[in-house]
Amino acid sequence: MSVTEMFSHIQGFLSADQEVREDIRKVVQGLEQTAREILTVLQSVHQPTGFKDIPNKCLKARELFSTVQIHIGELRTKFPVEQYYRFHEHWRFVLQRLAFLASFVVYLETESLVMREEVAKILGTEVNREKGFHLDVEDYLAGVLIMASELSRLAVNSVTAGDYGRPLRISNFINELDSGFRLLNLKNDPLRKRYDGLKYDVKKIEEVVYDLSIRGLAKEPEAGGDK
Amino acid sequence: MSKREGNASARKRRPDSDQKTEDFVSQSAVISAFRVFQQELDTRHDKYERLVKLSRDITIESKRTIFLLHRVTSVPNVEEVLNEADNKLDGVRQKIGQIAEELRGEDIYQFHKAFTSGVQEYVEAVSFHHFIRHRTLLSLEEINAALVFIKDETVVIKAPGEIQGACVLTFQVTSTDYLLGVADLTGELMRMCISSVGNGDMETPFELSNFLRDIHDGFAYLGNVGPYEVSKKLHTLRQSLGKVEDACYMLRVRGSEIPKHMLADVFSSRTAVMEQDEEVA
C-alpha cells in the first residue's frame, strides 16, 4: 500500500467517525433540552409555593423522564454498543445531570438515596456495561453529588418556606452520604474534585440545623436528640 | 417522620425500636451500596495502573529499538542491526499481548488513555524498522496483523480426547494512534537523513525526502478531519520536511565539491544559520 493509499484509507475512517459523532450530538441536544425541562419543574420546589406542591412536581418530572427514555433509545442506535466509551464524552455531562435529576426526584418522593438500578430504570439505561448502553458508576456518583448541593439549597429554602423539620432530615441524609463517599478511594480526577465540594454542602446544612436548634425552632419528636 | 441523627457506631449501641431499625437498615443500604462502588472503582483503577505500567515498558523498549535502528547509517552490517531490532520488537509485542489480556472483555476505549503513548511509540519503532528494510510505509493493517496472540488456556479435561483450548486475542491499533506514531516517525527519518548525509550516503537522503514529502502530503490531505493532536504534529512535520529538503538541495548543489567527511559540517552550519533566521523572524 502506498503512502497516499494509506492516508486515503484513514481519511475514510476519520470521516465516518465524524459523522457518527454528529449524529450523537444531535440526540444529545434533545436530551439536554429535556433535562432542562425537568430541572425547571424541580427548581420550583425552592420557592414557597412550589414547596407545598412537591408530589405534583415529582409526577410531572416522571412524565418528562419518559421522553428521556425515548432519547436514550434513539442514542443507542447511533453507534455500536461495544464502543460506548469511545463516544462517552459526548453524553457524560448530560447523563450526570439526568442522574442528579433522577436522584432529586426520588429524594423528594421518599427522602432516601436512589440506587443505581433505579436511576437506570428511570432513564432507560442499563446498569452494567455488558448489557448495553449503561450509566457509568462515576456518572451516577457525580449526579448524586450534584443533588447534595441542591439539597443544601433546599435546606435553606425549606426554613424560609416554614418547614423546620426538613433541614434536620436533609442533614442526616447528607451525613450518611458523606460516610458512603468516604469509603471510596478516589483518584485525582473530576469526581474527586466534585466530592471535595460535598464538605461545603455538609457544613452549610449543619449551619442551618444549628440556627434552628439554638432558636428552639427545630422539631425534636424523639427524646434525647443530640447533634 | 424524621430520621434519627447520629453516626453508625452510636446507632449500633442504641436499643431497637421500629423507627431505629428502619433507619439502621436504610443506612446500611447506602453504606453497602458504596462498598460495592468502592470495589468497582478500585478494580477499575487497578487495571488502569497495570496498563500504564505496561505502556511505560513498551515506550522504553520501543525508544531503545529506535536508537538501535539509527545505527544502520554507520555500521557495515545492517542486517545484524535489523535482526536485533526484530527481537526487541517481538518483546514489545509480547507486552502488547499482555495489554490485550488485560483488556479482555473490556471496552478498550475506557482504558485507552492508559496505553496510548506506548502504542504510538511502538508504531513509530515498527514503521521505522519497516522503512529501513523496505523503503515503504508500514500500513495499519500490517501492524494489526502482527498483533494477534494465541493464548493457551488450560482447560480441565472433562472427556477423553478433549484438547487444551486456545484462545485468540487481538490488539487493534486505532487510526489515531497510528497517525500519531507515523507523525513521530518523521522526526526519526529526518535524523536519519542528517546522519546519512554525514556518512556520505548519496542515495538515502533523496529517498527519505520523497518519502517524507508523501507523508507530509498525506497529513495535509487529512487537514482538520483528524483529532486535535494530529494537527499539532503537522507543524513539527513541516519543519522536519524542510530540513530534509535543504539537505538534499545541498547535496545536489554542492555535494560534488565538498569532500564527504565535511558534508555533515557544511550541513549543520547551514541549519544553524537557518534556525537563527527563524528566531529573528
Image (cartoon, rainbow, N blue to C red):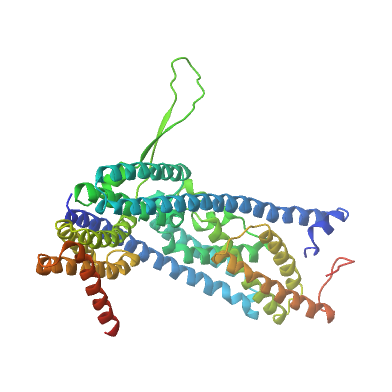
Residue in front for this viewpoint, B158 or B82:
B82
Q: Position of residue B72 (x, y in %)?
A: 26, 51
Q: Quadrant of the C terminus of chain A?
A: bottom right
Among the 4 quarters of the image, the one containing residue B196: bottom left
Q: Residue at x 49, y 27 (%)?
A: B154
Q: Residue at x 55, y 64 (%)?
A: A189
Residue B197, above or below B280: above
Residue in front for this viewpoint, A221 or B221:
B221
Residue B32, above or below B217: above
Tell whether B6 sits left or right of B79. right
Among the 4 quarters of the image, the one containing residue B254: bottom left
Q: Residue at x 67, y 74 (%)?
A: A200
Q: Residue at x 27, y 65 (%)?
A: B225
Q: Which residue is situated farthest in the top direction here?
A: B160
Residue A153, above or below B226: below
Q: Position of residue A73 (x, y in %)?
A: 41, 55
Residue B102 visible, this orientation: yes
Q: Position of residue B209 (x, y in %)?
A: 17, 62
Residue in front for this viewpoint, B270 or A5:
B270
Among the 4 quarters of the image, the one containing residue B255: bottom left
